[in-house]
Image: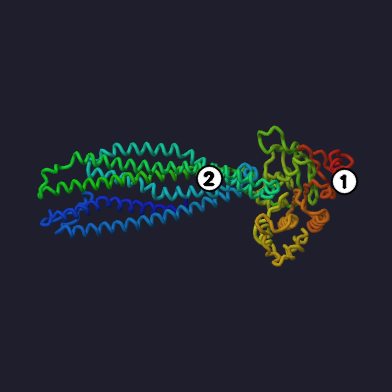
């Protein structure tokens, strides 16, 4: 927590203490007011000086008559009430300020941390869980923080202060606390024992709700094509009903806590009145001379009951603060579970070396996504790609083609062997420097909502209009971009729904080229382009980026047949690494693929 927020939090606690301290005077002030009204009504002290005692320590007076005393007590009561309200408002405002700012910092810190994680760690965390972490969990932490700053102070001070003043008021009546306090403490323990599992379950159900929502939105086309609307509605209704059931149970526990607490307060009041009934002065011997004794007895009972309510109010506050804290504790554990995840990629942050030539070499590389997997995804791969070469990679689905690309961009570490770029182990590079010179055109290109210009500047903030126009022409995107009325300012909608798949792929290719990379990877990323446009884009790239090392992963031979060499990968192993013409003569798998695609 920053020093600024620590200071503000300190002031919030200070004003909360002042608020409670002032409110602790209320039962005594009310009793003194009742006493003076009774004195005025009975006329018993009209000829005597009146001394008003506040909590047995502060003495006000003497006053000549009850009317004057009532006026002063009333003024004191109103003044303390105004001060108490003011201190409470200031404390609340300060605690809210700290809580909301800390939640903002926590949210930003988690967001930045998630952005820094590599693909391996991101894949281990579900998207719905991360959404819950960034929204609901941090809200619960914020509520717990705001509650702890004020109410965690209010509760104990009300409880302890009220208990002390009750003892000072009437020791005999304090016997009731021996019954009330153990019952309430036992009850609070039961609340925690029953409530905590429900709070944990609530957060888990929120994860499931986010999952169902995300799947229904992302898969809306599939749902409609198979007429699965009713099925999805049923699944969502089921999880919503589960959420409702758990929420009702947790809320019922809180309501039950309040009811039982108030019941115990009323029972304690009855006990106090019963004790008072046995210890009161005798009514038979009341005279004008000793009526003040009886009035003082009534005042002490009234004051004691007031402090009993203060004590129980402190306990009630403590109960509900504890509920907030337990809720926030569940969320805090989930939050820090993500925040404490460390990247397991081996990198050298202090190495400022840039990729210069773009040579790539795999030396005895084996890899599996999970250490407990029986079979490796890639096994003992050896190949070298020279600077400026264009290399194709082809093979059956699931053979490991995309995994090779992921290892080149260092999204994962190899299990065995080395991946070298410019004859340097990829683990010795600064990851940021590596990303600056490698462009990866993914199977499903992603554009952010906003203008085309904004998306282009994400790759290179210093790119001029001329630079952007150049890469748009290379990616065969210039014409359709400038056919838009607002050209580069044309807005891309969320998920790029207002442009075609081919337009999205070409814009993404243009974006990656703006980085002026040394290595360019196409991962089946021209699937939405026809063969003519595909060939045109590749020819444009080759003519304008002559020293660019290019890797083309594709299921279509037409996309890679002009490559300098082609890697044929089968079941995680290289079965061929040669030119198109030579592979047709020597590699059975390549021949089969060639024949299956028309043999031309």
> Does residue 3 show up?
no
Asked which quadrant contains residue 424, the reply is top right
Q: Position of residue 88 (x, y in %)?
A: 36, 55
Q: Residue furthest top?
A: 374
- Note whether 573 is above or below 504 in the view shown: above
Residue count near mark 2 (Cα–Cα under 10 Å), binned few <14, some 14–19, many ≥20: many
The disc at residue 231 is: none
The structure residue drawn at horizontal position 25% and vertical position 41%, both measured from the top left corner, is 272
Asked which quadrant contains residue 159, the reply is top left
Q: Nearer the viewer, residue 255 or 205?
A: 255
The structure residue drawn at horizontal position 87% and vertical position 41%, both measured from the top left corner, is 591
Indicate which disc, 1 or 2, sits on the residue closer to the N terminus: 2
Instruction: Identify the secondary structure beneath mark 2.
Output: helix
Residue denoted by label 1:
598
Q: Residue furthest bottom?
A: 485
The structure residue drawn at horizontal position 60% and vertical position 43%, both measured from the top left corner, is 235
Residue count near mark 1 (Cα–Cα under 10 Å), binned few <14, some 14–19, many ≥20: few
Q: Position of residue 164 (x, y in %)?
A: 27, 44
Residue denoted by label 2:
335
Q: CA distance from mark 1 to mark 2?
A: 54 Å
Side of 119 where 151 appears, left or right: left
Q: Position of residue 479 (x, y in %)?
A: 77, 63
Instruction: Identify the secondary structure beneath mark 1.
Output: loop
* Chosen colour scheme: rainbow
> Does residue 55 show up?
yes
Which mark is in front, 1 or 2? 1
How many numbered markers are drawn? 2
Q: Position of residue 323 (x, y in %)?
A: 43, 43
């Amino acid at each position: 927590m920053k020093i600024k927020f620590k200071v503000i939090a300190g002031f919030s606690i200070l004003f909360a203490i002042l608020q409670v301290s002032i409110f602790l005077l209320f039962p005594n002030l009310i009793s003194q007011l009742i006493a003076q009204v009774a004195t005025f009504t009975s006329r018993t002290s009209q000829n005597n000086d009146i001394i008003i005692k506040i909590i047995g320590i502060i003495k006000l007076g003497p006053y000549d008559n009850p009317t004057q005393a009532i006026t002063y007590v009333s003024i004191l009561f109103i003044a303390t009430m105004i001060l108490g309200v003011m201190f409470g408002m200031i404390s609340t405002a300060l605690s809210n300020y700290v809580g909301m700012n800390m939640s903002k910092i926590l949210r930003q810190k988690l967001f930045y941390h998630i952005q820094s994680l590599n693909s391996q760690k991101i894949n281990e965390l579900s998207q719905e869980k991360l959404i819950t972490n960034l929204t609901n969990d941090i809200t619960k932490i914020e509520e717990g923080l705001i509650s702890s700053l004020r109410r965690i102070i209010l509760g104990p001070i009300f409880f302890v202060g009220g208990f002390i003043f009750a003892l000072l008021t009437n020791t005999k009546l304090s016997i009731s606390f021996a019954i009330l306090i153990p019952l309430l403490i036992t009850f609070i323990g039961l609340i925690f024992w029953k409530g905590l599992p429900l709070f944990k379950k609530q957060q888990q159900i929120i994860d499931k709700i986010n999952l169902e929502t995300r799947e229904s939105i992302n898969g809306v086309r599939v749902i409609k094509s198979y007429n699965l609307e009713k099925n999805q509605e049923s699944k969502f209704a089921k999880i919503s009903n589960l959420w409702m059931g758990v929420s009702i149970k947790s809320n019922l526990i809180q309501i039950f806590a309040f009811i039982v607490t108030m019941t115990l307060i009323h029972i304690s009041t009855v006990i106090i009145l019963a004790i008072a009934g046995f210890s009161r002065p005798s009514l038979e011997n009341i005279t004008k001379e000793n009526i003040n004794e009886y009035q003082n007895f009534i005042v002490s009972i009234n004051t004691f009951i007031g402090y009993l309510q203060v004590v129980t109010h402190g306990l009630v506050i403590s109960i509900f603060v504890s509920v907030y804290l337990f809720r926030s504790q569940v969320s805090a554990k989930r939050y820090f579970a993500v925040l404490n995840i460390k990247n397991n990629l081996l990198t050298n942050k202090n190495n400022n070396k840039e990729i210069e030539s773009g040579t790539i070499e795999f030396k005895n590389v084996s890899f599996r996504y999970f250490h407990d997997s029986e079979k490796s995804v890639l096994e003992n791969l050896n190949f070298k790609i020279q600077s400026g070469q264009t290399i194709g990679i082809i093979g059956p689905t699931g053979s490991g083609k995309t995994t090779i690309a992921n290892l080149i961009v260092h999204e994962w570490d190899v299990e065995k062997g080395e991946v070298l770029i410019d004859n340097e182990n990829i683990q010795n590079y600064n990851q940021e420097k590596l990303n600056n010179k490698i462009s990866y055109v993914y199977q499903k290109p992603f554009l952010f909502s906003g203008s085309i210009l904004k998306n282009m500047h994400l790759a290179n903030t210093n790119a001029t209009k001329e630079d952007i126009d150049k890469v748009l022409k290379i990616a065969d995107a210039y014409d359709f971009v400038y056919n838009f009325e607002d050209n580069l300012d044309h807005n891309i909608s969320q998920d790029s729904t207002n442009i075609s798949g081919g337009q999205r792929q070409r814009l993404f290719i243009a974006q990656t080229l703006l980085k002026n990379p040394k290595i360019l990877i196409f991962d089946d990323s021209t699937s939405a382009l026809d063969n003519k446009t595909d060939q045109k884009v590749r020819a444009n790239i080759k003519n304008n980026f002559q020293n660019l090392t290019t890797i083309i992963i594709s299921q279509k031979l037409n996309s890679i047949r002009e490559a300098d060499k082609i890697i044929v990968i089968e079941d995680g192993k290289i079965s061929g690494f040669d030119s198109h013409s030579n592979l047709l003569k020597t590699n059975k798998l390549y021949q089969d693929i060639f024949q299956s695609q028309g043999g031309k």
